[in-house]
Image: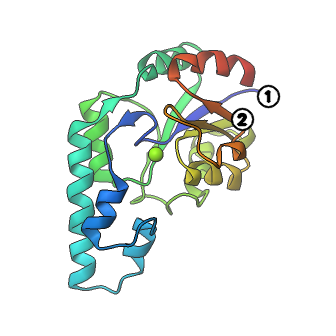
Amino acid sequence: MPLCGVIFDLDGTLVDSGLDFDAIRADLDFAPKQLILETVDRLPAGAEKDRCHAVLRKHELRGAQRATLMPGVAGFLEALAERSIRTGILTRNSRESTDITLHRLQLELHPVLTRDDVPAKPDPAGLLSICKDWACGPSEAIYVGDYLFDIQAGQNANMRTVLYAPASLPEYAHLADHTLRSFHDATQLLDQLV
Ligand SMILES: [Mg+2]
């Protein structure tokens, strides 16, 4: 299958921004495992919703300021550029924090879509929009992410999925088409995909 482009998740995949979702939930007074964005979205307009947005923004801006590239990412992006394979980003993070992270780390991928641009993953709208921008079909692209929503979004878009799992394999790892333990091995995986 020809490969037109690779779409990446941002936090926990391209970069380590140290976002601690359990700490965010605690600050929001949410239950463990409660969906963060979806719960905030459902709150009626008012002081509590504003407080939640402020808490989320504080955590995300802090993450953007400390984010570092995951090991091997720079080399993999270079290898993709050498092969004229396009690269884009779909993230559940905000436009504000995403732009800070990308600017700080001098990452240039296009397009970059955030939750302020398209419905959040696992909705496939962002992945499909990027493919449309590239004028390629979903089957010609792959999505690389580190969480269940990434794999579900890819499946919902009929796109091949790669789960980035540097620490340990989660119980949903079997849902992904491929797993990647280190970006140092990503170019090798690419050779299997094209
Ligand atoms: Mg992630």
Q: Identify the amino acid type marked 1.
A: Met
The residue beneath circle 2 is 140
- Of callouts 1 and 2, the N-terminal one: 1
Q: Which residue shows up at 58% across the image and 32% down it? A: 6
For label 2, count other residues whose C-alpha is less than 10 Å away and answer few (under 14), some (14-19) or many (20+): some
Find numbered disc 1 in the image and state the secondary structure of the residue it sits on.
Answer: loop
> In the rendered view of the protein, which quadrant contains the N terminus?
top right
CA gap between label 1 and label 2 equals 7 Å
Give yes or no for contact between labels 1 and 2 (Cβ–Cβ under 8 Å). Answer: yes
The quarter of the picture where the C terminus appears is top right
Horizontal relation, residue 121 to residue 92: left or right: right
Q: Is mark 1 within 8 Å of ligand 1?
A: no
Q: Is residue 194 visible?
A: no
**Picture coordinates of residue 89, whole percent (x, y):** 47, 41
Measured from the top left, where is residue 113 in percent x and y? Answer: 45, 49
Q: Is residue 88 visible?
A: yes
In the structure shown, which secondary structural element does the residue marked by tag 2 occupy? helix
Badge 2 amino acid? Glu
Task: Estimate the x, y position of residue 57 in percent, counting from the top left.
Answer: 24, 59
Of the pair 112 and 73, the residue shown nearer to us: 73
How many numbered circles does the render carry?
2
> Where does label 1 land, which residue?
1
In terms of depth relative to the viewer, which is nearer, 67 or 124?
A: 67
Residue at left 44%, top 23%? 73
Rendered location of residue 22, percent (x, y): 35, 58
